[in-house]
Image (cartoon, rainbow, N blue to C red):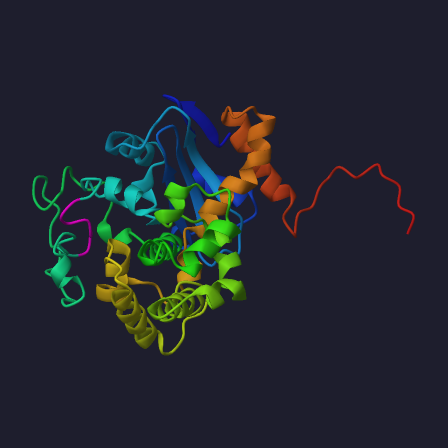
Amino acid sequence: MFFEKKDGLVLCSNICGLIEHMGMSYKADEWRLFIDSSNKSLKAVLLYNGNAAASVPIGHSVQMSETYENMKTLLTAIKYHNHNFLICGDLKVIALLLGLQGGYTNYPCFLCLWDSRADSQHYEQKYWPPRTSFLPGDHNVKAVPLVDPKKILLPPLHIKLGLMKNLVKALNKNGAAFKYLESKFPRISEGKLKAGIFVGPQIRELMKDMHFEEALAGVEVNAWFSFKQIVQNFLGNSRSPEYEKLIQDLISSFRQLGSRMSVKMHFLQSHLDYFPKNCGDYSEEQGERFHQVICTMETRYQSKWNVSMMADYCWSLKRDGPDAQHKRKSKRSSFL
């Protein structure tokens, strides 16, 4: 038995045993922990570095919301400090894990003391004082970090979504490009469209759309092509030898467009060395895809995550594996 239910949290009580039972050798440094949270749920999934293996859920609750205390409960329950996985997730999750204050704060970067409100300095100043400590009450730190900051991975997918958001927000709302977005994505509300809130599949679709590129004008064209270059040659599975120049071009084109620098742009400008050599191998995107994969099983269990559902999902991974062998033979006749 690898799963148990405790205080509203369904968790894996023996991660090493579960991985080995699924036919893989267990090495903690070959996995990263993806944590996702919302106002209604908390989810922890192991992702294999390089994405050669399926996602393995190890914790879930539909009663625990996104709070520092619940993150602490989750990490304790799965015995995180026995494994010390690298951790990926969106910036909200990262802030909770490191005890940082949420929302629009002066110092949202966990790597340095970048002042998010010093707009006049953002494009001028590349290097900021490093964050050397996490003392509660100092520089937007609310509580003691739950994990080692060095174990945090920057989120390539959410950085891509953030860049898209910055670009669309800076577009001329009366221009042809923005009007085209309104007609192409009629189901996106006006508020979300103006805020530049898109999901990965929509961005991939737009990157292939020549009509959108034709609708762009002036500095919008350079900003869009710079964005595409970063997505294709840095934030994915490929890194161009000229990636530093591509990022400089992106920052310059967004500045000309009049885009306000966000913390996600700041990571590209000031903490380029912190990104892994292959962002695709350590992205949180596989964790986001887990939501889509699990939908069928959630329907079967009527959205009530329990020990049986977690075990059933893991068994399906083992059963569907390319090297899976089953003792029970199929009763279907073969006509070949």
- Is 197 one of the magenta-colored residues? no
Query: Residue at the location (26% across, 68% down)?
Result: 256
Q: Position of residue 155 (x, y in %)?
A: 35, 53
Q: Which residue is found at the position 63% from the left and 48% from the top?
A: 321
In this rendering, does residue 76 appear at all? yes
Which residues are drawn in magenta? 105-111
Locate residue 194, reporting x and y percent: 36, 48
Is residue 107 rendered magenta in the image?
yes
The correct choice, above or below, for 242 with respect to 234 in the image is: below
Image position of 40 with respect to 113: above or below: above
Q: Nearer the viewer, residue 148 or 134?
A: 134
Residue 154 appears in the rendering: no
Q: x%, y% of residue 180? A: 48, 56
Looking at the picture, tell me which residue is in the foreground, 121 or 68. Answer: 121
As drawn, is 257 to the left or to the right of 140?
right
Relative side of 128 to 232, left or right:
left
Give percent across and percent down for residue 47.
45, 49
Given residues 119 and 128, the one toward you in this image is 119
- For the point 43% across and 60% down, the residue is 177
| Residue at the extreme left of the image, as rendered | 138
Residue at x-position 28% and y-position 56%: 264
The secondary structure that dominates the magenta segment is loop
